[in-house]
Amino acid sequence: MRRTTPIIILVLSVLFLIVDFWPKLTLPNFGDPNGGSRSVETKLGLDLVGGLQVEYRLLPVGDRQPTAGALSTTKSIIENRVNSTGVAEPVVQTQGADRVIVELPNAKNPDEIRALLVQTGKLDFVPLPPDKYGKQGAVGTYQAVDGQPLPTTETPLFGGEEIDQAYPSTDQTGGRAVGFRLKSEGARLFGDYTRKHVGEFFAIVLDKKVVSAPVIQSAITAGSGIISGGSAGGFAAKEMNSLITVLNYGSLPFPLKEESSTEIGATLAGFSLDRILLAALIAVLLVFVFMLVYYRLPGLVACLVLIYYALLVLAIFRVIPVTLTLAGIAGFVLSIGMAVDANVLIFERMKEELRSGKTLSSAMEAGFNRAWNSILDSNVATLITATILYVFGSATIRGFALVLIIGVLASMFTAITVTRTILRWVVRNNWARAPRLYGLREDEFTARTLQSGRRGEARTRA
């Protein structure tokens, strides 16, 4: 294992350096049901880079008042709706009994995002009678345009709650199309209607505005079908994804009213980001100074490993990805403190072993072995606390907890494995046997230690 550990460390170094610094790196987007890839980037939260914040209130319908279940469903629908567009990484959270707060960091197209978020009403499948709207190929054929109002006199056949799933598909010519599957009641109603109205139009309507108005080309009796685009090659990719989003996430249990909308400017966000980064940098530099002054050579090793640790954690953040907020950066700085704490325990134990007359190699190994239980206990306690915060906390607290969990796990790896591997190489060198390099006096760093170290090195070479 000792021989393979340096190789593992070097391989990880190459991988996270690529993730951290390779321009325009892409990875498979496993969270997207439609597949594809995503750019690897450091995602910053609304409080760091600015963006759009919108507050909605659920409105009662007749005697029905919003419930906790309806609030949770609304939150999920809005989150899925925005995620499916790829416009931004939303932070959606509930507040009180009837409020939903939507935060969109680094929103480059706020008008486009707002247009999507305001589509919060009812999704309906509406028949279009031929006596008013005509048939396919007939004079006066109904020409649907996205966003065109539909006369309210038409009675919906069924609502969006009957949509089981919508997904990308292809038509008979290989063009882009939208496949859909209905639940049992919707399948029955649609089957009965399409058998009698082949060649006629029906409309998919959101908030009383037409999203799509395809022609019924054949009876749809199996509860699933395909909506084809009106031009050669089918839908454009953007149109297909937009229609899938509406079908999957268009209908909400209660209508929403926008209570407020705030665009956080880049100047204010940049000011906050500069301040927090400066504070984090000062904190880390002070830690470096302390380690170098008090622990000398082992402290230098610890500083190098902390740089390794920071690059490793950044790579993990970019791959997952983790959206960094002010609270998240605080969690990251705290995890650096946890990593230093582990090194302090190890180095103090190493000093005690050196004072007892052990060789450098023996003292170093004993320092790691005897400090391990304390390091494990403290880190496990932190992980338990952070996990509880992640499970039960708000969005801001969850971000802090997630960063802290990743940081603590990474610090355990770097403090025990990377630091130990480097020190094993360091203590084998003659130049590393000076007492001042370990913050010890001559009488503490005994002659027996030096002599034992040389004998141990000779035995190792033999």
Image (cartoon, rainbow, N blue to C red):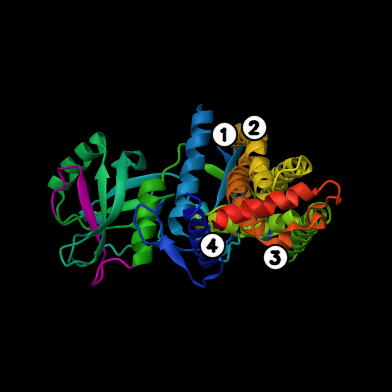
Residue at 61% of width from left, 60% of height from top? 311
Q: Residue 13 carries which label?
A: 4
- Residue 439 falls within the magenta-colored stretch: no
Q: Residues within 10 Å of mark 3 (few under 14, many from 20)?
A: some
Q: Distance between the residues labelled 2 and 1?
A: 21 Å
Give the percent coordinates (x, y) of residue 440. Answer: 83, 50
The answer to whether the residue labelled 2 contacts the one labelled 1, judged by CB atoms less than 8 Å apart, is: no
Q: How far apart are marks 2 and 4 (CA)?
A: 28 Å
* Mark 4 or mark 1: whose residue is earlier in sequence: 4
Front residue of this view, candidates 119 and 452: 452
Q: How far apart are marks 4 and 3 (CA)?
A: 34 Å
* Mark 2 or mark 3: whose residue is earlier in sequence: 3
Rendering quarter of residue 272 = bottom right
Front residue of this view, candidates 214 and 412: 412
Residue topped by disc 3: 266
Report the mark closest to the observer, 3 or 1: 1
Tell me the magenta residue range.
218-236
